[in-house]
Amino acid sequence: MTRRFRWTRPAPGGSVTVTRVAGDHELADGDPQRRYTLSVPAAADATVSMTTGCETTWEDETLWVTVHDGAGLARVRLRTSGAHTAFRFPGPTFDDQLTAAIDGNEAAAHELLAAAHSPIALVLASGPFLDVEGFTALVDALATASEGASDDLHATRYDLVRIAATTATGPPVATADEFEALVNGLDAVDAIGDVTVLDALADATAVAHDTAGETRRFLSDLGYELPLLAERDDGRFLAHYLAQVARTAGVRDAKQAAARRAANTDHTDFEDAKAAAERADYWDRGAAWRDAVLPAAGESFPTFAYVLANALYWTGEVGRSDSRADELLHEGAAAAARTIDLEWVAGHADYERARAAAHRHRSKRNHALALAHFETAREVAESQSFLDPWEPTYSHAVVQSNMLSTTGNHERAVAVLDDALADLREQGVPDDRFAEMRDHLAGQRHERRAIVADDNSDRLAHLEAALDHYESVEFERSVTRIQAKLDDAEAADDETGDESREESVRPQPVLRPDPEAGPSLEDIPDLHDSLTETDPGAVGSADPGVLPDERGDGLPDDPGVPGRDSEPHYR
């Protein structure tokens, strides 16, 4: 079962129940239709507007909606009590395409994408009349059909879960079982990356809740128990929750929450837990400091704040989550650290929070926001003696260069890379890291030069140089991209060579050079400036940006064309 024939939407004065009416009209030759009824509270005061191809009639307090073929995904706006509620209804062709796409028909998925504003809008608008299984199957179908769609869905996969769980948009998510079915279903879509329950809950906490009380009510409404979530997997959700308390209510409230938890659980002695945390290596440090939080709840306030700040910071530092979980942890860590003037942790937390937000926006192609957050990270680093500005300098340059290339300003994009390399030399980057940055920036420089090369031999030379640089830093995704471009360029070179050889066997006319003549239009390569390809590296990836695709991929307004030069998977 993937389709729903009855669903409910909240509306002013109550809720509206939508029912799909089955019958012969759905199969009628020449004029197939889809019909729906809406039970509307306070129907006498309601007004209706609709899109083309859609008709409505009232029958007492029931609104009948008829959607004719060609209407696509029709929209009906119902105004009651001074507020609007929008409903989406699939027309016959859209309905058939949706069913076929969910069943694995790739051509149907392409047709849906071609008619949609974006794959995100498409899946969310379709959510109310799909169950969770159908929703995740649709995401899978779209992501498989188009690499551009998979990039977009990858960048917003946690948003999809949060929206479904906290609003009336998307598939129904009213219980913990439905929440986890949605998360697990999306996680099973190979083309969009991993999705985990704890990170999805943390994402909802960070974005949708202004207080810890709202978080508790949200969890309770779904049927979750906070003590059980605190024990789940590696126990990091307790850190997420305490970060929420610390950033909204304060660290003293976080201490009280930890003390209540500590009173009902067994835990190690504080000194032993603290000593283990101080000995832990980088990757285990977050878990070790988390183990010290409950024992520290019985210690002094400064001691607890110190432990909590470290627990939240180090958990976020190694989190590498694409949800807002790491940003939530770093914000909580900074709040805890500042209560005891622990500037090292506070500064690092501010820095990493800005970088995490920047990478999240970069993944969504929000270039301006990404640049602003990278600039914030650089400013934080420059204000602290224990931080270095080179990582945000490097990432800022890659994103800015990509943004310029999307507008066709490739020369300026190259200049940004050159300026960044000069800045990085002055900033004293350690030799090994500088070598990685230099090779990546040089690879991007050559890749951009290949876009505007005057002839195919120059294009080949730049692509081969880019390949050498990417291979030296083992950027597998970039290597794959360049190899595909080399294959295209070499094929074009071979075609040119074949034509030359064919012409050489014929008598050739004597050509008189004309000093006024320049290259013909055929000598100028076609340039296609698409949107910047989504970075498939997690936060902190060594490969923080890539080039726009000049190989003819569909633009965002034409999402039905699958991208040929993008890689949706995370490294």
Image: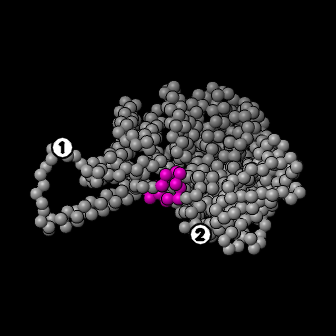
208 versus 147 height, above or below: above
**What's the mark number on residue 516?**
1
User: Is any atom of residue 173 visible in this view?
Assistant: yes
For disc 2, the neighbor class at 10 Å (few under 14, some 14 to 19, many from 20) is some
- Residue closer to the observer: 101 or 386: 101
Q: Quadrant of residue 128?
A: bottom right
Amino acid beneath label 1: Glu
Question: Which image quarter: residue 197?
Answer: bottom right
Q: Which residues are magenta?
A: 554-571
Instruction: Indicate left or right for 108 with 68 as reference.
Output: left
Which amino acid, mark 2?
Gly
Secondary structure under badge 1?
A: loop
Q: Nearer the viewer, residue 59 or 94?
A: 59
User: Where residue 343 sits: x, y (%)?
Assistant: 59, 28
Task: Give the side of residue 535 with respect to residue 500, left or right.
Answer: right
Q: Which mark is residue 104?
A: 2
* Label 1 crowd bin: few (<14), some (14–19), many (20+), radius 10 Å: few
- Inspect this view and state whether residue 297 appears: no
Q: CA distance from mark 1 to mark 2?
A: 58 Å
Q: Is residue 565 magenta?
A: yes
- Residue 434 in the image: state x and y as whole percent: 38, 39
x, y percent for residue 468: 32, 51
Q: Which mark is residue 362?
A: none
